Amino acid sequence: MREFVRLMRWSTIVIVISLTCAPAEERNKWTTVDWLRQLNYTHELHNVTTDDGYQLQLQRLPQVGARPVLLVHGLLSSSVGWLCLGPDRSLAFQLHQRKYDVWLANLRGMSPYGRHHLELTDVMSEFWRYSFHEHGAYDLPAIIDHIVALQAREKHDDVANEEEQKAKQSLAAHRVLLIGHSQAFNAFLVLCALHPRFNQHIQLIQALAPLARLHRQVRFDHTHVRDIMKFVKKRQKANKYELFPPGELKRMCRKKKELCEYYTKNLVGSAQSNKKLLDIFNYDHLLQGGSAKELRHLQQIWKSGDFIAYDYGPIENMQVYHGVEALSYNLSQISVPIILYFGETDAIATPQGVHDIYAHMLSTVRNVRRIAATKFNHFDFLLSSEVKTLVNDKLIELMEKFLEGNLPYVIE
Ligand SMILES: *[C@@H]1O[C@H](CO)[C@@H](O)[C@H](O)[C@H]1NC(C)=O
Ligand SMILES: *[C@@H]1O[C@H](CO)[C@@H](O)[C@H](O)[C@H]1NC(C)=O
Ligand SMILES: *[C@@H]1O[C@H](CO)[C@@H](O)[C@H](O)[C@H]1NC(C)=O
């Protein structure tokens, strides 16, 4: 243990030097593991396979025996968003320094950790047939089962063989604290609605800028959605099922700077500093991935105003859901305590949209918190220079109050 502490202290010193020394262009190409290696931060890599054959890599900043916290990235993002501001500001490090066992999820489609499958390759169209439904129905179950099983094993490492049976039986007692950004909340809802046993495995979810129902709640209109869907169709016609391969957004933004600035101002970024506005597009692995089906599913929810499974049309729906209509998720199954966070100027998870989740969709919301800044947008939850004080410190404080049983009921 003392060795470990010394190592950590060392790496903190090293970090500062190495981060400022690394050439910026190189850093832009870094993956999650590149960041961890560069920082010499103790980490483990875990592979899990989903029931439908996707092989996902999880990263862990281990604190064996401590409470596991699972961080789940959002739409078009990946695990790198939880650590790319470094050990002083990013949530993954902050949680680890506070002695949580930190796990970083990578859902299917994300480069490079969600790009393997037992039978498919990522140039096949079948590989890209997913939306948040599959993230919740297959990816999260595999990931959480892995963490819970390992937690049980590590806890019972020292017990004799005859105790093993008991340890296995007590799997249900092992739980994770979930933190999700953006679309991760939809995946969580799907998970707990389709597989209610996970209500017992998730002690608390804290959802940053959660999406759920989008109708009349996002801050963009029919023209924007039509433009985006036109783009999606064009890509599909050209047999490009992945919407934004790593680096693609960067190239697009160089070519069409104004359009890029427009979207950034409206959809992401705090718009606090125009100079930094386009920075996020420079990081290959930060904003990337995404399947056409993923955006189509969101478009369907936006259009219908219902939180429903993917609508294949009446004929295919018959085969998939045994009814002409798309499956409606049974949200009354959900019993996990929920804390929601919203940014005042978030164009996707608008204040109104987040309040709608609390008021009309779910009965287990324990807190709704406004980020204390006049401007705070969708990706600021990961990238704002003040993310530590505005988001992370608050989130850890509320989580610990919850764990002590002292979380006050606050709706902001
Ligand atoms: C990380 O640790 C390795 C060996 O443990 C060392 O060789 C390397 O210089 C360290 N990296 C940095 C950036 O300090
Ligand atoms: C995890 O999966 C990756 C990619 O398929 C593979 O290269 C690596 O060897 C696997 N690691 C383990 C520990 O199985
Ligand atoms: C939804 O889940 C609740 C709670 O488990 C159950 O009582 C109800 O019958 C379910 N509704 C449907 C339509 O399946």
Image (cartoon, rainbow, N blue to C red):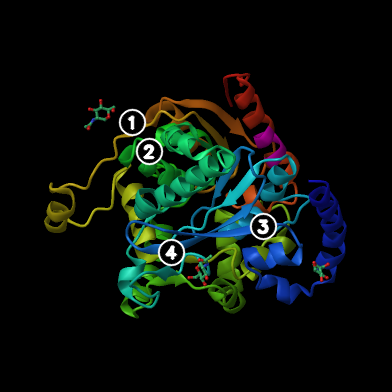
Residue under label 3, please give it: 43
Q: Marks 2/3: CA distance?
A: 29 Å
Q: Are marks 2 and 3 in contact (CB under 8 Å)?
A: no
Identify the mark nearer the N-term, 3 or 1: 3
Ligand 3 near label 2 (Cβ, under 8 Å)? no
Mark before the other along the chain sequence, 1 or 4: 4
Q: Is the residue at mark 4 in contact range of ligand 2, meaning its CB lies under 8 Å from it?
A: yes
Residue at 67%, 55% in the rendered image:
83
Ligand 1 lies under 8 Å from the Cβ of mark 3? no
| Residue named by callout 4 | 55
Report the residue marked by disc 2. Answer: 192
Q: Which class describes the residues within 10 Å of circle 4: few (<14), some (14-19), or many (20+)?
A: many
Cβ–Cβ under 8 Å for marks 1 and 4: no
**Amino acid at pointer 3:** His
Nearer to us: label 4 or label 2: 4
Q: Amino acid at mark 4?
A: Gln
Residue 333 badge: 1
Asked whether residue 229 is in view, the answer is no
Crowding around mark 3 (Cα neighbors within 10 Å: few <14, some 14 to 19, many 20+) is some
Quadrant where the C terminus sits is top right
Q: Pointer 1 and pointer 2: residues touching (CB < 8 Å)?
A: yes
Mark 1 vs mark 4: in front: 4
Q: In the image, is residue 391 above or below residue 131?
A: above
Q: 276 above or below 147?
A: below
The image quarter in which residue 362 lies: top left
Indicate the position of residue 112 as horizontal and vertical percent values: 53, 69
Question: Is residue 15 part of the magenta span, yes or no?
Answer: no
Tell me the magenta residue range: 392-396
Seen in the picture, residue 153 relative to 14 is either above or below; the reply is: above
Residue at the image position 18 percent from the left and 53 percent from the top: 320
> Mark 1: is the Cβ under 8 angstroms from ligand 3?
yes
Q: Earlier in the sequence, mark 4 or mark 2?
A: 4
